[in-house]
Amino acid sequence: MEKQDKFLTTMEVAKLFEVTDRTIRRHIEMKLLPAIALSSRHWLIKESDLDVYKQNLKNRKRGEDRGK
């Protein structure tokens, strides 16, 4: 039997990463965080996709550090 993913709202993810809901939505728009659109402002994020998001943030940070 497959384990089913838990889904989180943008607000829940924002709390986990200590950022604003708007930042999470912006990162979804930038394709840094995979998400499922419920409407133009409401999204669901698979808990399993948070690892992908963490890696995307690390890669993005490394790119910014090289530019300095």
Image (cartoon, grey):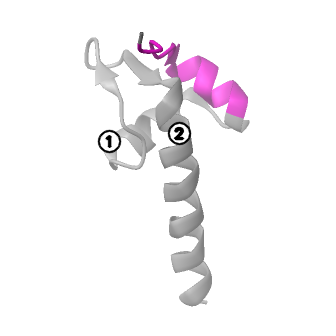
Q: Position of residue 35 (x, y in %)?
A: 35, 29
Mark drawn on residue 66: none
Q: Position of residue 32 (x, y in %)?
A: 41, 49
| Magenta region includes residue 26 | no
Instruction: Classify mark 1: helix, strand or loop.
Output: helix
**Along the horizontal axis of the image, is 40 left or right of 27?**
left
The magenta stretch is 2-16
Q: Classify 38 as above or below 23.
A: above
Work out whether mark 1 precedes mark 2 in sequence or the reverse, and give the earlier one. Answer: 2
Count of numbered labels shown in the rendering: 2
Three-letter code for the amino acid on which mark 1 is drawn = Glu
Three-letter code for the amino acid on which mark 2 is drawn = Thr
Q: Nearer the viewer, residue 30 or 4?
A: 4
**Along the horizontal axis of the image, is 46 left or right of 13?**
left
Q: Classify 36 as above or below 27.
A: above
Q: What residue sits 44% from the left and 12% below the top?
A: 4
Cα distance, mark 1 to mark 2? 10 Å
Q: Which residue is mark 2?
A: 23
Q: Classify 33 as above or below 2.
A: below
Specify the farthest residue to the front.
1
Q: Position of residue 7 (x, y in %)?
A: 48, 14
**Along the horizontal axis of the image, is 9 left or right of 16?**
left
